[in-house]
Image (cartoon, rainbow, N blue to C red):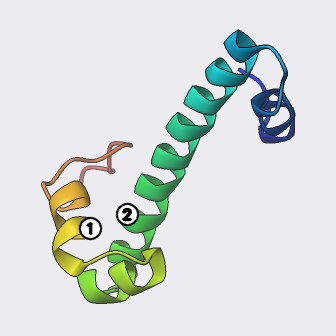
Amino acid sequence: MSDGVTLAREAGSQDPAVGLRAVRALRELAERLEALQVASARERGWSWQEIADHLGVSRQAVHKKHGGGRRLLPTKER
């Protein structure tokens, strides 16, 4: 996988095949980063409203997307 700088450059390519692949990869990267940051915020006690405010979405939207108990990375068993 390319790094973010390479993907950003490729997203502006004159070749639509290159540009669209880069856009898709950037979208997937952004989704993964969002999930990681939301999980981090929740682990630190942030409310859904605080997270939503920082993402610029409604509390309901962020909870629906990230509140279903899904985790991107497994947690340690206690």
Q: Nearer the viewer, residue 57 or 72?
A: 57
Q: Residue at x 36, y 43 (%)?
A: 72
The residue tagged with tag 2: helix, strand or loop? helix
Amino acid, disc 2: Ala
Q: Residue at x 15, y 61 (%)?
A: 64
Horizontal side of 75 relative to 18 (left or right) equals left
Q: Nearer the viewer, residue 76 or 11?
A: 11
Query: For mark 1, does the 10 Å Cα neighbourhood hold few (<14), some (14 to 19), or many (20 or more) residues?
Result: some
Q: Position of residue 71 (x, y in %)?
A: 28, 47
Q: Determine which quarter of the picture holds residue 63.
A: bottom left
Q: Position of residue 26 (x, y in %)?
A: 62, 37
Callout count: 2
Q: Position of residue 69 (x, y in %)?
A: 15, 54
Q: Earlier in the sequence, mark 1 or mark 2?
A: 2
Amino acid, disc 1: Val
* Residue 42 to residue 67: above or below: below
- Residue 62: which numbered mark, if any? 1
Disc 2 target residue: 39
Which quarter of the image is occupied by the N terminus? top right
